């Protein structure tokens, strides 16, 4: 497994002093262009206690390794924040790659001035974590995303530098999550104390299936129609400190009943955890992005659609299609390509993509998807022979028979996963060649 290196450089540590929370920023992009230390927002958080607790939850997920936990924390990956104008979104990913966390501070929780829109990393250090944990319900909280001279009141003013390895599986996880989430719908909901009782009553280990039963959520060891898979309930741990503020718990699942998402509605904000299908399984190998990345138009369309994005809180596919002059299905494929480059996420509550710019190189798409790279090599080498709705793919290990209709293959990958982790390289290669054949015949 290879890893890129992410360098964080902060003008000063983030701090919380006399009710003023100053979050130091490191690099990123704004509407005004690339910025070393962008300043996005300054104002009052009207719901201080839940905001502080939820921000701490996002930071906790960035520290966590739920599968094979380490005795001490490894490399700390700082959370990402995006200012979409009317809201702030904080995101993180667990070190094991199986849990994605996001806090959306909505307009109802913010009262202040927006200086710019964009995305950056924010420093969440140990002293700041301790200070956030002490914020009470009546404490005032002034938030600055990006430091100014009034906020930098502690330390000696020295530059803070961190160099953090970002493994490929961790980078790929951001892409997979937004594609998987876009295929989810709401499967259950609990209000108030019912949500508290349900979450606190869950075991820490095992695999459960959660179903809406009247006004309750029921957890069972057996799958039932419409149920949501919950593997490793301990991965919901960062929801528990927020339950005292919770208004509603919503549960989302996909048609394949594999991954799930758990959203707490808090006063003026939402906190969401998205879980991989197994406690030991990260999102990086799911392969959900591969169908869209294999299309010939996706890369060019992504360049066009990317230029039209403007850090919107909701990306309207129909409007983008009109502006770009391409069909809506190609816009969706382009958004997948942009997601691989860290440029879009997906908001389940609003069933819409949102624009953000993670600091990853968009040219690494093939490196982050080795199956697609191998498929293209097979296609370019002439290893695919089409026979109507079937194809034969010649490999060093022998010939593989592919069905273009249902995406099945005679290789070991397909027999092991049956499509649950995306198409194999042979199916991708066959579809690439089949698409090219259709284009030539037009």
Image (cartoon, rainbow, N blue to C red):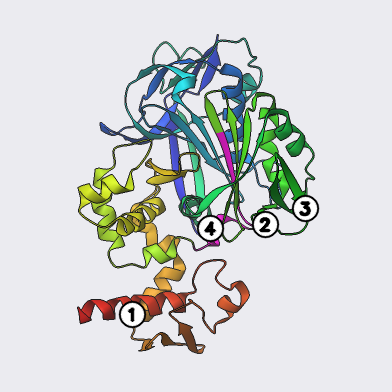
User: Going from the N terminus, do you reach mark 3 or mark 4 first?
Assistant: 3
Contact between marks 3 and 1 (CB within 8 A): the answer is no
| Residue underneath mark 3 | 220
- Crowd band around label 2 with a 10 angstrom C-alpha radius: few (<14), some (14–19), many (20+): some
Q: Residue furthest front?
A: 214
Cα gap from disc 1 to disc 4, whole angstroms = 27 Å
| Residue underneath mark 2 | 280
User: Going from the N terminus, do you reach mark 2 or mark 1 first?
Assistant: 2
Task: Decide which of 409, 93 is in the foreground and name it.
Answer: 409
Contact between marks 4 and 2 (CB within 8 A): the answer is no
Query: Residue 112, position in %: x, y?
Result: 40, 15
Residue 250 seen in render: yes
Cα gap from disc 3 to disc 2, whole angstroms = 20 Å
Q: Quadrant of the C terminus?
A: bottom left
Cα gap from disc 3 to disc 4, whole angstroms = 28 Å
Residue 12 - label? none
- The residue shown at (39%, 21%) is 41
Q: Is residue 249 above or below residue 13?
A: below
- Crowd band around label 4 with a 10 angstrom C-alpha radius: few (<14), some (14–19), many (20+): many
| Residue underneath mark 4 | 284
Cα gap from disc 2 to disc 1, whole angstroms = 36 Å
Q: Which segment did they paint magenta?
A: 271-287
| Residue underneath mark 1 | 434
């Amino acid at each position: 497994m290879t890893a890129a290196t992410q360098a964080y450089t902060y003008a000063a540590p983030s701090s919380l002093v006399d009710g003023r929370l100053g979050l130091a920023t490191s690099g990123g992009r704004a509407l005004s262009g690339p910025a070393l230390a962008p300043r996005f927002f300054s104002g009052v958080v009207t719901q201080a206690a839940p905001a502080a607790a939820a921000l701490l939850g996002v930071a906790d997920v960035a520290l966590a390794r739920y599968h094979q936990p380490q005795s001490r924390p490894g490399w700390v990956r700082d959370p990402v924040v995006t200012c979409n104008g009317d809201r702030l979104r904080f995101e993180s990913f667990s070190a094991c790659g199986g849990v994605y966390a996001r806090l959306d501070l909505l307009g109802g929780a913010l009262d202040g001035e927006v200086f710019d829109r964009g995305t950056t990393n924010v420093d969440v250090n140990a002293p700041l974590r301790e200070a956030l944990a002490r914020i009470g319900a009546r404490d005032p909280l002034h938030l600055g995303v990006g430091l100014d001279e009034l906020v930098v009141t502690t330390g000696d003013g020295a530059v803070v530098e961190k160099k953090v390895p970002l493994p490929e599986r961790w980078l790929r996880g951001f892409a997979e999550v937004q594609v998987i989430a876009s295929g989810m719908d709401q499967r259950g909901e609990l209000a108030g104390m019912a949500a508290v009782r349900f979450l606190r009553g869950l075991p820490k280990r095992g695999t459960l299936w959660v179903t809406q039963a009247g006004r309750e959520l029921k957890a069972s060891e057996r799958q039932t129609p419409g149920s949501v898979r919950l593997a490793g309930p301990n991965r919901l741990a960062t929801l528990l400190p927020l339950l005292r503020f919770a208004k509603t718990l919503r549960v989302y699942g996909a048609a394949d009943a594999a991954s799930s998402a758990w959203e707490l509605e808090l006063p003026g904000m939402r906190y969401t955890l998205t879980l991989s299908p197994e406690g030991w399984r990260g999102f990086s190998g799911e392969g959900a992005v591969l169908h869209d990345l294999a299309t010939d138009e996706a890369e060019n369309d992504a360049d066009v659609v990317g230029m039209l994005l403007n850090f919107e809180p909701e990306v309207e596919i129909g409007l983008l299609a009109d502006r770009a002059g391409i069909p809506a299905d190609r816009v969706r494929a382009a958004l997948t390509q942009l997601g691989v480059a860290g440029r879009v996420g997906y908001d389940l509550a609003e069933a819409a993509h949102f624009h953000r710019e993670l600091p990853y190189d968009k040219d690494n798409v093939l490196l982050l998807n080795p199956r697609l790279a191998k498929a293209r090599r097979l296609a370019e080498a002439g290893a695919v022979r089409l026979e109507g709705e079937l194809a034969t793919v010649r490999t060093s290990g022998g010939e593989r028979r592919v069905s273009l209709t249902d995406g099945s293959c005679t290789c070991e990958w397909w027999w092991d996963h049956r499509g649950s982790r995306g198409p194999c390289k042979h199916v991708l290669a066959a579809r690439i060649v089949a698409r090219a054949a259709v284009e030539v015949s037009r």
